[in-house]
Amino acid sequence: MMTLRGGQRLAVAGAAAIALLLPGCVAALPLGAAAVIGRNAVSSGDDNGDGQTRAARKQARAQERAQRREAKRQAELREKARKQGITIVSGPLPPPTGTEAPPAAPMSPLPPASGRGPGGATAPPGMQFLYGSGEAAALSAQAYRALSQQVRINVDYRQAGIGAISVALAPGSTLAAPRFAECGTKPLAIVLDIDETVLLNLGYEADEAERGLSYDDARWRRWEATGAAMVDAVPGAVKALTAARKAGVEVIFISNRTAGSALATARALEGAGLGKAVPGETLLLKQDGTDGSKDARRAQVTAKYCVVALVGDQLGDFSDLFSAPGMTPAARRAAASSVQIEPLWGAGWFVLPNPVYGTALKGGVADVFPANRRWTDPAAVPAAPVRAATGTPKE
Ligand SMILES: [Mg+2]
């Protein structure tokens, strides 16, 4: 606001006094007249008594007008930002750069954009989910909590003389007619896969994401040998395995890591808090020259133990029958959901999420989506007919 100095105040007061004395004529224009008189008073000399020149006063008024315009502009921008959900923490907004100033960016620093790491590489959605999300952590904890309950039930049954419940398929089983290995008086055990079941291979996957690489067998071998410190335990695993061992249940790992990396793998497990694993006894890895099937190693375990739980991130961690020739994604899904197999999930068979790699990630649209569950958006624009080289539309 313009500030009136001594002489100006007197002029305004005088005009108001005249208005009071002559209400019939002057009272009709008191404020406007006062303003005019005031303005005249302001511009009546080069020096109003405090040393200000006319040019200086003109400049001051121009600054005041500019400040008012800027205050109005900032208020409008703040309101516009508020409507767009942008929080203005404090401080002035940037000066206008054109006819229409854009809403200001938030003044507080933003976290990195989703999927961007320190190096700027984008993490694939599967990695975002498995290694970075609370949802995956919750799923894993959920599975391991259920595993602990299964262990507890079997320990209680064994102590009560009821007998434990074996969940390892016996040789000759099929998915349609599963049979389970006998327990007898064998000691209890649980059998777990390692990668993305008890260990998260953070270092390897970060390298792959950062450099945009796909899986490479030689690089994986180097990872097995040197990456023991760059892993984390899957959420829930440490607590569940510690409780199982405390209850007298053996913990056995069957993994397709190579036997040559056994000591490094044992170090990785122990370093992650998952306890000791003894190569050849409680750590059964893939021998050179063999395929990745695990049934033979499971049979090796069931010869000595009553297996009360299997844990894995691939269906092959439960039975090689899921990987038999002809097992399409739809066939595997149907088998996993069948009346014979479905009751095992969460009740002896415990599966961990893995959207990053493995046997689950197969199939085109026709394999993944049932033909009777297709929908086309009514608003979708039909694809233009493809024209052959002759210009004749193809049917
Ligand atoms: Mg695995």
Image: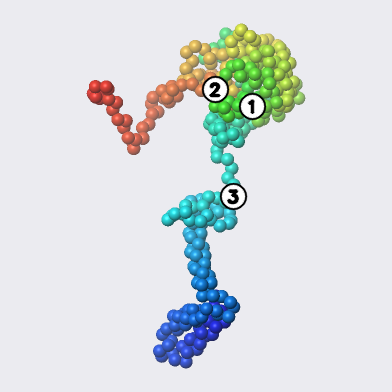
**N-terminal-most mark, 3 or 2:** 3
Q: For residue 203, which numbered disc appears in the image? A: 1
The colour mode here is rainbow
Reading the image, the residue beneath label 3 is 108
Element assignment for label 3: loop
Q: Is residue 142 visible?
A: no
* Cβ atoms under marks 2 and 1 closer than 8 Å: no
| Outermost bottom residue | 21
Q: For residue 214, which numbered disc appears in the image? A: 2
Which quadrant of the rendered structure holds the C terminus?
top left
Give coordinates of residue 269: x percent, y percent: 70, 23
Q: CA distance from mark 3 to mark 2?
A: 37 Å
Image point (44%, 82%), residue name: 33
Element assignment for label 2: loop
Amino acid type of the residue tagged 2 in the rendering: Ser
Give coordinates of residue 139: x percent, y percent: 60, 31
Amino acid type of the residue tagged 3 in the rendering: Ser
Give coordinates of residue 241: x percent, y percent: 71, 25
In terms of image quadrants, where is residue 133? top right
- Front-lying residue, 8 or 127: 8
Q: CA distance from mark 1 to mark 3?
A: 32 Å
In terms of image quadrants, where is residue 29? bottom left
Amino acid type of the residue tagged 1 in the rendering: Gly
Q: Quadrant of ligand 1?
A: top right
Image point (69%, 23%), residue name: 228
Asked if 340 appears above or below 109 in the picture, the reply is above
